Amino acid sequence: MPRLESCAWSCSCTARGRHRTQLGDTAAGLAAKVGEMLSSSVSNPSLALVGRGARSPSTSSASSTASSTSSTLNWSQHLVQRSVVLFVVGAFMALVLNLLQIQRNVTLFPDEVISTLFSSAWWVPPCCGTAAAVVGLLYPCIDSHLGEPHKFKREWASVMRCIAVFVGINHASAKLDFANNIQLSLTLAALSLGLWWTFDRSRSGLGLGITIAFVATLITQFLVYNGVYQYTSPDFLYIRSWLPCIFFSGGVTVGNIGRQLAMGIPEKPHND
């Protein structure tokens, strides 16, 4: 009997040892597989973030598209508002200053030309308003392109003083009497450069002012040559020699108005 009990006890112990060994091997195998899975997920994080990563690009793309669309609308709306303001300012200034030239018999329109308010040709205010809108939008655009933002006297008080000086220069061209037109032209040229130095002092403003004076003078020569209107006592081909000075100072004035209107506008969105 003792031998049978010892034998049975030894057999049960052997079975238990084998069972424990199998459980240990199974646990070791599972641990090895889990370790392999963790290492593979660390080495390739895109597999571990399939669900979340698949959604994040589309979400960020949608948000960036919505933001770009909103900024585009804001920029376009602000551009239209600035254009309308510049057009109205240019048309009004042309109407008033052209009236001064007509009253002093500096500018003469033929009788068959249709006249409207203040006895001025109907096409003068719209043309000058369009030119003012183009010039006023061009000045801040060139500043941004050159990377030289204009910061000299950026306040509306300075802009209003610039307008007053420009009106004074135009008034002097019609009111002042000199011995000859050369003296008048030199005086107005000095006043125009003084206006640029006082209210602008930028290379872009000087370059654009000279370009505007040259192009506007050519257009005026063409109109006068075709008999649309004429100047009394022309001394520079068909026009007065001081006219480029008026165009130069007018370009600087309208450019300062456009720059002031462009302050605080949203940046134009870029398509990447």
Image (tube, rainbow, N blue to C red):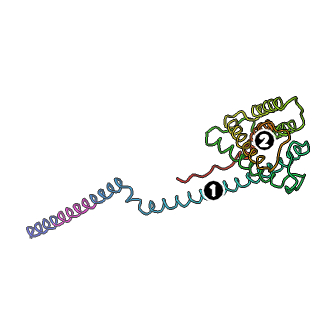
Q: Which residue lies at the image location 86% right of the left edge and 56% below the top edge?
A: 112
Residue 23 within the segment the image draws in magenta:
yes
Q: Which residue lies at the image location 79% right of the left edge and 54% below the top edge?
A: 126
- What label sits on residue 238 in the rendered view? 2
Q: Secondary structure at mark 1?
A: helix
Determine the image quadrant of residue 68: bottom right
Q: Amino acid at mark 1?
A: Thr
Please identify, in this view, whether the residue under mark 2 or under mark 1 is nearer the observer. 2
Q: Which range of residues does the magenta coloring cover? A: 15-30
Residue furthest right in the image: 103
Instruction: Look at the image and tell me in which quarter the N terminus lies.
Output: bottom left
Mark 2 or mark 1, earlier in chain: 1
Q: Identify residue for label 1.
A: 72
Task: Name the spot of residue 202 as percent of width and height, x first.
Answer: 69, 34
Front residue of 65 and 79: 79
Task: Name the spot of residue 114 as percent of width and height, x first.
Answer: 85, 57
- What label sits on residue 211 in the rendered view? none
Q: Residues within 10 Å of mark 1 (few under 14, many from 20)?
A: some
Task: Name the spot of residue 134 as percent of width and height, x first.
Answer: 71, 49
Q: Secondary structure at mark 2?
A: loop
Main SS category, magenta section: helix
Task: Name the spot of residue 124 as percent of width and height, x first.
Answer: 81, 51
Front residue of 191 and 59: 191
